[in-house]
Amino acid sequence: MPDDSIKADVVYLCSPNNPTGAAYTKEQLEAWVAYALKNDAVILYDAAYESFVVDPAIPRSIYVVEGAKECAIELCSLSKTAGFTGTRCGYTVIPQALKRKAGNGQEMSVNKMWLRRQTTKFNGVPYIIQRGAEAVFSEQGQKECQEMLEFYRENAKIMMNTLTKKGIKFYGGVHSPYIWLQCPNGMGSWEFFDYLLENLAIVGTPGAGFGKMGEGYLRLTAFGSREGTIEAMERIEKNL
């Protein structure tokens, strides 16, 4: 959460978060927006996993907070919403109300600066991928996306149930495809990674790979087959 003793020009927020799976409440986002407005900071709000949110009380966009349009840029992706990983297809929301001063003191529109950057340095996503993205927002596309998201949510539930039975502390899995678990028996991230790989043939992502604060944790993902998820959890339940 915001620390008034620190003056930041840019704040990066990811909610629901990768890798922890945690999601900000509206009250928490209000605190960040208040901080940004007070310090003339810009919030880069990564909403790549917003489609996994199931609780109406959890914001899917930072713009539900009053004042956010004056300080926040929202980054959205079709990678997780519609399985577009690798196609580099997403969109960025930059409100017209977002303005900042240049070095000479002149007030500049961030929206216009971004448009100039995009039109001079980026040739756009390939047309065939654009047509696929267009289909995502059709009635049938939305229906299929929701079915896919529900499939991954069920995978997450299977993992959470097993970890709960084993008494392993974890976060996420509800509004996110990721489960952030505490490595058992005081193991380090890479130590637990090696143990799962060598003894149970299960692959996760060592928390230390996300930075020093991730040491002692491991990330599991719901982006897998149902059969593979069940098999992995059965191995953990029997052997861990």
Image: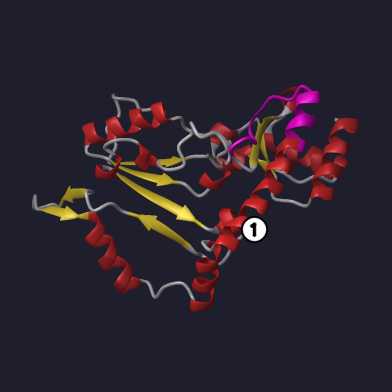
Residue 228 location, x and y as percent?
82, 49
222 or 10: which is nearer to us? 222
Q: Is residue 161 above or below residue 112?
A: above
On screen, residue 226 versus residue 118, left or right, reads right
Start-end of magenta stretch: 158-175
**How are the colours assigned in the image?**
secondary structure
Q: Residue at x 41, y 30 (%)?
A: 26
Identify the residue position indicated by label 1 in the image: 144
On screen, residue 22 versus residue 156, left or right, reads left
161 or 86: which is nearer to us? 161
- Residue 152 visible in this rendered orientation of the protein: yes
158 or 114: which is nearer to us? 158
Q: Is residue 220 above or below residue 88?
A: above
State which quadrant residue 168 falls in: top right
Residue 175 location, x and y as percent?
58, 37
Q: Residue at x 27, y 32 (%)?
A: 7
